[in-house]
Image (cartoon, rainbow, N blue to C red):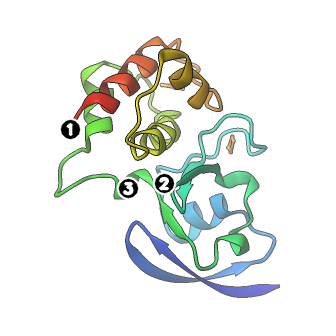
Amino acid sequence: MLKQINITLNGVERSVEIDERESLLEVLRDKLYMTSVKHGCGVGECGACAVLIDGVAIDSCIYLATWADGKEIRTVEGFEQDGELNAMQEAFVEEGAVQCGFCIPGFLVSATELKETNKSYTRDEVRKALSGHLCRCTGYQKIVEATEKGLEKE
Ligand code: FES
Ligand code: FES
C-alpha cells in the first residue's frame, strides 16, 4: 500500500510517497538520492547502509521506511559544516582510513554517534561500537585510529 511519510532529512523537512513494504534504504537511495547510504548485504550484517535515526545508528536495510515517519534522519550528505568536512571526516582522511570507500559512510555514521555523546572511549569500546561494520579493504586498524582521532578533535 502507498503512503506519505514526513521526515527531517539532514535538517530539511521532506515528504515522500513510499510503498509500506519498502526499506528506508530503498527510499533514501532511490527516491531521495542519498547515495552515501550503500546497499551491501541487505540483511543487517555489514553496516554499509547505516544512518542516524534520531541520533542512533541503525541499518536502514532492515528498517521499514514507514517506521521513519516523523523522525530525524541524518546521512553523510548532511555531515559537512559550512562546506567543510566535519572533524570525524577529516580524521578519516588524515589517517588514510579510506580505500575503496564503500563501507566508509556507515563507519562515519557510527563514529559520529559516538562523538555526539561527548564521552571518552577506550580502544576496545571504539572497536565494539564499530563492530557492526564490515570492511573488505582496510583491515580496520586505520579506521579505529581515525575514529579515536575524530573523537579527540574539536
Ligand atoms: S546493507 Fe544493511 S547491513 Fe548490509
Ligand atoms: S574501504 Fe573498501 S570496503 Fe572498506
User: Does the numbered disc 3 mark a residue whose Cβ is under 8 Å from ligand 1?
Assistant: no
Which amino acid lies under the numbered mark 3 shown in the image of this protein? Glu
Task: Identify the amino acid type marked 2.
Answer: Thr
Say which of marks 3 and 1 sits in front.
1
Q: Nearer the viewer, residue 7 or 22?
A: 7
Disc 2 or 3, which lies upstream in sequence? 2
Mark nearer the N terminus (2 vs 1): 2
- Distance in Å between CA atoms under marks 2 and 1: 28 Å
> Is the residue marked by circle 2 packed among few (<14), some (14-19), or many (20+) residues within 10 Å?
some
Amino acid found under the numbered disc labelled 1: Glu
Q: Which mark is residue 35?
A: 2
Could you give the CA–CA distance between mark 3 and mark 1, rounded to whole angstroms? 20 Å
Residue 64 in the image: state x and y as whole percent. Answer: 74, 65
Q: Residues within 10 Å of mark 3 (few under 14, many from 20)?
A: few
Q: Judge whether 115 appears above or below 23 on screen.
A: above
Snapshot quadrant of residue 146:
top left
Left or right: residue 46 versus residue 13 is right
For label 1, count other residues whose C-alpha is less than 10 Å away and answer few (under 14), some (14-19) or many (20+). Answer: few
Percent x, y of residue 63: 73, 59
Give the vertical position of 44 relative to 20 (above or below): above
Q: Position of residue 97 (x, y in %)?
A: 38, 21
Viewer-closest of 31 and 9 = 9
Please name the residue shown 39% across and 17% down the image: 145
- List the residue tagged with mark 1: 154
State whether residue 5 is above or below residue 39: below
Q: Which residue is mark 3?
A: 77
